Structures are given as structure tokens and as C-alpha cells.
Image: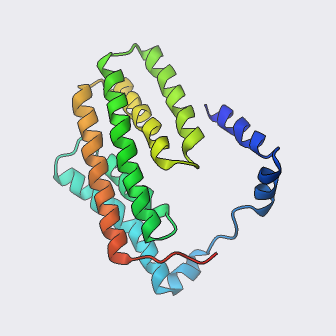
Amino acid sequence: AAAFALLLLQAGRLLPQGRDRAKRGSGPRTPLRELLREPEGVRELSCYAVAPLAAGALATALGGAHPYWAVVSAVAPLSGLGTRHRVARAVHRVLGTLAGVVVAFALLSLHPAPLVAVLLAVAFQAWAELFITRNYALAVVGITPLALLMVDLAVPADPAAVAADRAVETLLGAAVAVLLVLVTGRRSRPG
């Protein structure tokens, strides 16, 4: 799946607009020292510390079986460029997860053989790679069954319980992220 995604990426560079994008690159990164000199930078770095800690602590306190799902769901929206984009990314995370949970529950209820589960995981990995840069919600629809299939391969469990845990802990993590984003009110950077 990863090799296919890399080939697809390189194929995109054959097109004129792909070559132009490759030449421009992603732009310079802001050094950590510069971020620490500005209040907005300190706020931004604080979000990356507070979000996972709060989501993980809440999920653990509520008895979540997989608190790391809440942690990931709290951090994932923070990569957005501004408050609006971050909130939208959290919503995409939740909606994609809920759709993915339905798919995963249906597959896990069939109790696929390990080889079938691995092949399905490869297909969902390819799905995620294809959509992750274009439509986050659609990518998460593939990421969710991939994660749940991997969990089931490692430690088989009740599909309904695992699906419910994923949905609840994703909602919890996304809610923490949205609350933090709204409280800190990061503005979009020009450019």
C-alpha cells in the first residue's frame, strides 16, 4: 500500500502542476526558539502538550480501554492552519471515525481469518494513503477499520465493544481539541 502510494505520488509529479508544486516545496519551518519568543507560539506549543494529556487523562479516568485513541483524536485536529480549519478537522475526524466504525463492526462481526484481516488492512491502508491529503474524513473512514482490524488481530475482542470504544474515545479526544482550540483562538498565518 505504501509503495503504491509513493508510485502514485511520483506519477502526479509528471503532470505540469505537480512539477511546479514539487519545485516550490512546503516552505520554511519556524524554528522552536522563534515560537517560544512569541505568546502565540507558546500558546500553540501548549496546545500540543495539553491536548494529549487532557484527552488521555479523561479517557483513562472514564475507564476507556484504549485511551490512546482519545490522545490521537485530540492531537490530529491541531495541525490545521487556524481555528476554523482545526474545528473542521476535528469534525472530519469524528464523522470519518463514525463511518469507519460501521464498516469495521460489519467486518469484525464476520470474524475474518487472520490472512483475510491482513489483506483487508492492506486495502484500508491504501485507502488512507490515497485520501489523507485530499479529504481527511474519507481517509479516516479507512484508517478506522485498519486500526480496529489490527487490534482484533492482536487481541480478539467483542466487535461491538471495540467499535463503541473507538467512537466514544474519538469523540472525547475531538471534544478536548475543539475546546482547547476555541479557548486559545489561534489565528491563521498569512501566506
Give the left or right position of residue 166, taking residue 22 as reference.
Answer: left
Q: Is residue 8 above or below residue 182?
A: above
Q: How many marks?
A: 0
Name the one closer to the observer, 17 or 86.
Answer: 17
Give the left or right position of residue 78, taking residue 2 as reference.
Answer: left
Q: Is residue 124 above or below residue 119?
A: below
Looking at the image, which residue is at 42% across and 59% down?
88
Give the left or right position of residue 84, taking residue 29 as reference.
Answer: left
- Which quadrant of the figure has residue 148? top left
| Residue 174 seen in the current view | yes
Locate residue 15, reporting x and y percent. Answer: 81, 46
Looking at the image, which residue is at 53% across and 27% down?
123
The quarter of the picture where the N terminus appears is top right
Give the left or right position of residue 133, taking residue 167 as reference.
Answer: right
Give the residue furthest to the left.
62
Q: Is residue 74 above or below residue 95?
A: below
Locate residue 86, reporting x and y percent. Answer: 43, 64
Locate residue 183, reporting x and y percent. Answer: 32, 75
Q: Is residue 32 above or below residue 26?
A: below
Colour setting: rainbow
Name the one closer to the observer, 76 or 61.
Answer: 76
| Residue 72 seen in the current view | no
The quarter of the picture where the C terminus appears is bottom right
Looking at the image, which residue is at 40% across and 43% down?
96
Looking at the image, which residue is at 44% across and 42% down?
140
